[in-house]
Image (cartoon, rainbow, N blue to C red):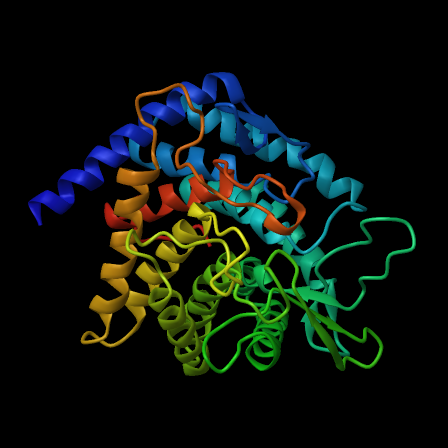
Amino acid sequence: MAEQLHWINEAWEQVTKRVTRTSKRIGANFPHASEKGSYILEEPYWWTAGFWPGVLWQVYRETGDDALKQLAQECEAKLDKVQNDYYRLDHDMGFMWTLTSIAQYKITGNEDSKRRALLAANLLMGRFNVNGNFIRAWNPWSEGEDNRGVAIIDCMMNLPLLYWASEETGDPRFKSVAKRHADTVLEHFIRSDGGVHHIIRFDPDTGEKVEALGGQGYAPYSAWSRGTAWAIYGLTLSYHYTGEEKYLETAKRVAHFFISHLPEDFVPVWDFRLPAEVASPRDSSAGAIAACGLLLLAEKVRTEESPVYQKAGEKILESLYKNYGEWEGTEEGLILHGTSHFPEGKFTDNPLIYGDYFFVEGLASLKGYKELFW
């Protein structure tokens, strides 16, 4: 136990040093992927906008460093324009305002943050397709594109914004929408072996399933590891908020699929089902996300089941720290070897801000912080 605590505390110290240093260059901006040691900064409307302020809040909660708090608050304020502009908002409002506004509200009690998060929850609820019981993922990426019927597994992590809004307001509509989307995921996204589809296209008018799409995985019926990780954590969070066993049992099934496909160092390749001739780089971000989900799952299952998930989550995080960190160099990212979008050749061996966020969240959980931003 002492050895375990040693590496966790050592990792947290390295994270704190790195975030404190890089915050002076990144400031109140929105990093996405690191290239040649420095994070590329995106516009605030991009789906990853919440992760850097989420990192700042995680570290601030432990250190009380007001400089990090101020940067996180400035990031949140910059998202007001995105919210008011409206047109570029999609289902990832959960990622964006959970790790900014809800995080600040839970830590500081700021009423403006509560208002922002509730507005985001209302806008997210407005994307719910009542014909098919799903939350529409994206707006058209190009003129003439029709993705009105597209839903993706990532959205399971946007649902906590809706669950939180119901708890905060006492209004059951938010929770009802979240549960209906989660039920659609159970029916159409999760395969019997625990594998997960990234994208399902529905007919937006009838609600009927049309097809599964490969998305960021290799193929429609492969097993994209980050999608599997989103499912583990998202389904466990749905159980956390609803107490409905169907979400817990499915989370366990997906978790066993994920764990059984991990290589020796416990960090997954980008897709678990690849032809031999296709490159299989690791996706450290999928490992970090899954680790957080597994640690929460360990808290929710029966006592005798808990060690399976707890140990897997710990081993993933320990491997990320010891084998995927470059702690003595000038790299701004926390963990190396993330794969963002292999089919499109985007950031296939890079630190990714969402991998960094979930790595920090996982360490915080191991340090004893049990109140979730989600």
Residue 207 falls left or right of residue 143: left
Residue most toward the front? 277
Percent coordinates x, y for residue 66 in the rendering: 40, 23
Residue 110 visible, this angle:
no
* Position of 253 relative to 228 (above/below): below
Residue 56 occupies quadrant: top left
Percent coordinates x, y for residue 106 in the rendering: 43, 46
* Position of 242 relative to 17 (above/below): below
Residue 221 occupies quadrant: bottom right
* Position of 292 relative to 195 (above/below): above
Residue most toward the right? 144
Q: How many marks?
A: 0
Residue 264 falls left or right of residue 356: left
Residue 258 falls left or right of residue 79: left
Q: Pick whichever, 356 or 117, lies toward us.
A: 356
At horizontal 34% and vertical 34% (from top left) the residue drawn is 325
Residue 150 visible, this angle:
yes
Residue most toward the left? 2
Q: Pick whichever, 225 or 294, lies toward us.
A: 225
Percent coordinates x, y for residue 77 in the rendering: 62, 32
At horizontal 41% and vertical 82% (from top left) the residue drawn is 245
At horizontal 60% and vertical 64% (from top left) the residue drawn is 198
Q: Pick whichever, 7 or 278, lies toward us.
A: 278
At horizontal 81% and vertical 76% (from top left) the residue drawn is 203
Percent coordinates x, y for residue 210 in the rendering: 76, 77
Q: Pick whichever, 16 or 232, lies toward us.
A: 232
